[in-house]
């Protein structure tokens, strides 16, 4: 099978060098404060650019939510991201969430558990497509899934990809853990820029405790409560 465009045949040493290049780039972002999104976004982008691990996505389970949802993705449209919602145990992604174990699908067309929910099969290359999904753990809990597609390459094995993705999933978990108690919350913003969705997300991330949510946004409990009530009233109206 031909290589992906832009991916000429490489030796094992050349692939290792690209892996080290990817990890080196991410290490520079690991110590950044605030949201982990820049690190996670760079991870997905460079997985594709350097190694051909395409349509990467970070699926997360937020506190208070009964489903896992795509939080960040590379190479997916907004509609495809919106469709990425999974119940525990549902499909390959849900299986990884429920079991805490990586799943390697060599051929998505031969795997009945592969739902093709986010990206329709017709929108993928005709050539054989593999799918790799690994758990993201933070503080001994499975909080999400790192997954991607791969067109098979004759000079790089899926086991090589799986080994690298284990490192990347661990890195993602470490970055999310460092962000507790607000792993996905932006730094404090002026009052007028707090949307209802943002306020609700902060509240859910902090166990529906307004005191903790207020602290995460640099507000008093009274300020947070007032802004939440105001945003809910505006949304209802």
Image: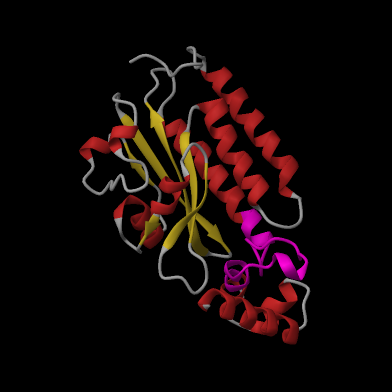
Establish if 170 lies above or below 182. above
Establish if 98 lies above or below 211. above
Q: Which of the 4 image quarters holds residue 225?
A: bottom right
Residue at 55 percent across and 22 percent down: it is 15
Q: Is residue 236 left or right of residue 24?
A: left
Q: Nearer the viewer, residue 150 or 212?
A: 212
Q: Position of residue 217 (x, y in %)?
A: 73, 71
Q: Nearer the viewer, residue 12 or 150?
A: 150
Q: Is residue 50 left or right of residue 188?
A: left
Residue at 66 percent across and 53 percent down: it is 36
Quadrant where the N terminus is found in the figure? top left
Residue at 60 percent across and 43 percent down: it is 41
Q: Which of the 4 image quarters holds residue 155?
A: top left
Q: Position of residue 139 (x, y in %)?
A: 58, 65
Residue at 49 percent across and 45 percent down: it is 57
Q: Position of residue 205 (x, y in %)?
A: 59, 71
Q: Find the magenta span and give its range.
A: 174-201
Q: Position of residue 124 (x, y in %)?
A: 34, 31
Structure colour scheme? secondary structure
State whether residue 170 appears in this view.
Answer: yes
Q: Is residue 95 left or right of residue 136?
A: left
């Amino acid at each position: 099978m031909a290589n992906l465009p832009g991916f000429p045949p490489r030796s094992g040493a050349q692939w290792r060098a690209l892996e080290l290049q990817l990890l080196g780039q991410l290490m520079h972002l690991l110590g950044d404060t605030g949201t982990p999104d820049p690190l996670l976004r760079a991870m997905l982008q460079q997985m594709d650019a350097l190694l051909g691990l395409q349509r990467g996505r970070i699926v997360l389970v937020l506190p208070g939510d009964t489903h896992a949802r795509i939080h960040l993705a590379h190479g997916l449209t907004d509609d495809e991201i919106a469709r990425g919602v999974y119940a525990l145990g549902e499909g390959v992604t849900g299986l990884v969430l429920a079991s805490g174990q990586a799943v390697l699908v060599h051929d998505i067309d031969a795997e009945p558990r592969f739902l093709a929910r986010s990206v329709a099969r017709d929108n993928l290359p005709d050539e054989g497509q593999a799918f790799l999904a690994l758990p993201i753990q933070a503080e001994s809990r499975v909080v999400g899934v790192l997954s991607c597609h791969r067109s098979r390459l004759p000079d790089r094995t899926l086991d090589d990809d799986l080994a690298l993705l284990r490192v990347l999933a661990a890195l993602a978990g470490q970055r999310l853990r460092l962000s507790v108690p607000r792993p996905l919350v932006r730094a404090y913003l002026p009052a007028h820029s707090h949307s209802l969705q943002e306020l609700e997300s902060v509240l859910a991330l902090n166990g529906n405790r307004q005191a903790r949510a207020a602290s995460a946004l640099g507000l008093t409990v009274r300020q947070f409560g007032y802004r939440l009530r105001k945003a809910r009233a505006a949304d209802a109206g």
